[in-house]
Amino acid sequence: MVAYLPSDGPDPVADCDVAVPRTGSGTALEAGPDVPDAAEIARIDPLDPLVIRRDFPIFERDFGGRTVAYLDSAATSLKPRVVVDAVNDYNTRHTANVHRGIYALGEEATALYEGARERVARFIGARDRHEIVFVRNATEAINLVAATWGRRNIGAGDTIVLTELEHHSNLVPWQMLIQEKDADLEFVPIDDEGRLVQESYDALLRTHPKLVAFTHVSNGIGTINPVREMVDRAHRAGALVLVDGAQAVPHMPVSVAELDCDFYAFSGHKALGPTGSGALWARRELLEAMPPYMGGGEMIREVHLRSTTYNDVPWKFEAGTPDIAAAIGLGAAVEYLVGLGMDRVRGHERLLTAYALDALAHGVPGVTLHGPRAGDDRAGVVSFNLPGVHPHDVATLLDREAVAIRAGHHCTQPLHERLGEAATARASFGVYSTTDDIDRLVAGLRKVQALFS
């Protein structure tokens, strides 16, 4: 397989005092091992996406005589029928508020809601379901940590270490915090293949940061970071670690116990669940010490006119009536993924990613592919550029072929500055993705090139 490195962008260490080794030359990478063809992938794929598609109602919809080639799972995943049914079941048969009504419907709703918390805890390897805080998405989870742990523990002159790969959700909350506290942000740069420069990371750890926060999997270029190794080194330096798992949880086995991080955030809607669902996992002792995020009902134990005592965790962080249906739907989604087997999910997407990178490199003349080559440190996210064609035009024209991709900066503007691109086109995969989807993408891109030639 031949892939192409990103073009030279702004120097990632121009304003950094840490010396960073430069790697990569901006030339084509050497061809890797042969990639299985579609027939061979169908034979060895640990999942059968054609069978899985029967569980997803959207594939029953007609798009001009075709089913949709949905290649935007990194933005939001499609929803299986079991998730739709779980939400509908709550809304039609168990509607009541949770933790309040001493009657059958209220007890049923509470059991379903807390049962979903137990399912999520098992799914990400949490030892205690009380360490799972339901939130709307990973963005809210990270903001919660910044506003509670961050405000209490970050002071003037303290340092937080992030990376150039981060989604805005794991950047803007920390910018807001350090502006309030007169603290500092430092960034681990990436090399020309999109991997974090670990020598720079070690150098930044020698400054003794209070917190390190980084993505498990880059939503921009698919890099899978070596989380456990980075966590271990951060802990030895005295830092706590927050991991943004939004692009990892739906696509590979995750155990927060094995990763040994301190905070882990993910969004339900990227993991086959409803929008408005997600979770923050944190060590219980940290949650116990953190102040509440919002005030109101449910997060209290007793309220008097001039004082309040707070509820136990996790309810201390779940003020007001939660999105009960979304949490129940998230519980159904993670159970569906457990049924598929997360090792098998990872195997399926690893095959598809290698196939896609190879098909694009050999089937679309001049394409620029960003990120690592297919392998253990590459997830099912493929961002690319066509010479002379804006990504928005690419996505618009592909839509005519019922091929759905993302175009833009994918909420990673600093990463795109590093790539030297204002925007990229992005194809991303899920459990329902097939080699035919990728073939349709390549054929559509050839049509786009013909229109602009």
Image (tube, rainbow, N blue to C red):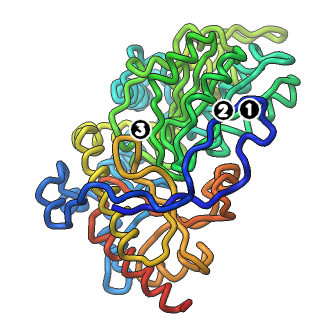
Q: Quadrant of residue 396?
A: bottom right
Task: Note whether 152 is above or below 138 in the view shown.
Answer: above
The answer to which of marks 3 and 1 sits earlier in the sequence is 1
**Which amino acid lies under the numbered mark 1 shown in the image of this protein?**
Trp
Q: In which quarter of the image is the N terminus?
A: bottom left
Residue 50 makes an appearance in the image: yes
**Which amino acid lies under the numbered mark 2 shown in the image of this protein?**
Leu
Q: Are the two marked residues, 2 and 3, in contact with CB atoms closer than 8 angstroms?
A: no
Determine crowd level at label 2: few under 14, some 14-19, many 20+ residues with C-alpha closer than 10 A.
many
**SS at mark 3 in the image:** loop
Q: Are the two marked residues, 2 and 1, in contact with CB atoms closer than 8 angstroms?
A: yes
Closer to the observer: label 2 or label 3? Answer: 2
The answer to which of marks 2 and 1 sits earlier in the sequence is 2
Closer to the observer: label 2 or label 1? Answer: 2
Determine crowd level at label 1: few under 14, some 14-19, many 20+ residues with C-alpha closer than 10 A.
many
**Where does the image place residue 109, in percent across and percent down from the top left?**
42, 32
Q: Distance between the residues labelled 2 and 3?
A: 20 Å
Task: Note whether 336 is above or below 25 in the view shown.
Answer: above
| Residue to which mark 2 is pinned | 162
